[in-house]
Image (spheres, rainbow, N blue to C red):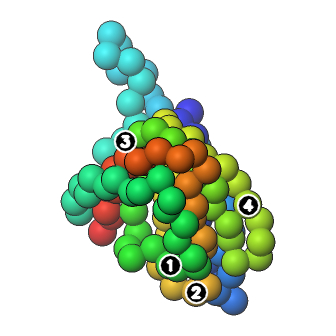
């Protein structure tokens, strides 16, 4: 299993966290692989140490792979969770009240966005 955290909006527009597991299948000497996931594009990003982005929705459905640093995401209901380098998020709250994101470590943080169809 490969664990990721999904951020999504419910019918009332409130954002929530959901822990999701992606199944992996044995692939011999190269390890265990998931099924191929369809993607649209890849975006590389770096943000300033002071990054603190007030409530916003995701611009599109996308995976975010955190490469370093640590962030806090807050849902519209006030639930907060921390994520660090190596964590993967699936952002699906493209409508509704959105989420807030801020750096917890004072570094230029790098991440990769993988946009989805």
Q: Nearer the viewer, mark 4 or mark 2?
A: 4
Residue 26 in picture, x, y percent from top left: 42, 21
Residue 92 in picture, x, y percent from top left: 50, 70
Element on which disc 2 rests: loop
Q: Which residue is mark 2?
A: 96
Q: Earlier in the sequence, mark 4 or mark 2?
A: 4
Residue at the spot x=61%, y=50% of the render? 104
Asked whether residue 66 appears in the rendered view, the answer is no
Q: In the figure, is residue 117 to the left or right of 83?
A: left
Question: Are dots 3 and 4 in contact, CB under 8 Å?
Answer: no
Q: Which residue is mark 1?
A: 57
Residue at the spot x=47%, y=53% of the render? 49
Please determine whether, in this image, residue 75 is positioned above or below residue 18: below
Q: Earlier in the sequence, mark 3 or mark 1?
A: 3
Please determine whether, in this image, residue 97 is positioned above or below residue 107: below
Toward the viewer: 105 or 29? 105
Asked whether residue 59 appears in the rendered view, the answer is yes
Q: Earlier in the sequence, mark 3 or mark 2?
A: 3
Residue at the spot x=67%, y=62% of the render? 17
Splitting the image into 4 quarters, where does residue 78 fall? bottom right
Tell me the crowding category of disc 1: few under 14, some 14 to 19, or many 20 or more residues within 10 angstroms, Cα based. many
Q: Which residue is mark 3?
A: 35
Toward the viewer: 71 or 27? 71
Label for residue 80?
4
Question: Are dots 2 and 1 in contact, CB under 8 Å?
Answer: yes
Q: Nearer the viewer, mark 3 or mark 2?
A: 2
Marks 3 and 2, Cα distance to the nearest angstrom? Answer: 30 Å
């Amino acid at each position: 299993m490969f664990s990721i955290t999904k951020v999504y909006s419910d019918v009332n527009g409130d954002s929530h966290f959901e822990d999701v597991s992606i199944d992996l299948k044995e692939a011999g000497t190269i390890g265990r692989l998931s099924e191929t996931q369809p993607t649209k594009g890849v975006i590389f990003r770096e943000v300033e140490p002071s990054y603190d982005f007030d409530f916003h929705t995701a611009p599109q459905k996308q995976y975010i792979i955190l490469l370093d640093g640590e962030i806090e995401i807050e849902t519209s209901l006030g639930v907060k969770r921390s994520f660090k380098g190596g964590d993967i998020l699936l952002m699906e709250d493209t409508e509704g009240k959105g989420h807030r994101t801020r750096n917890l470590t004072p570094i230029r943080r790098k991440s990769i966005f993988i946009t989805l169809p």
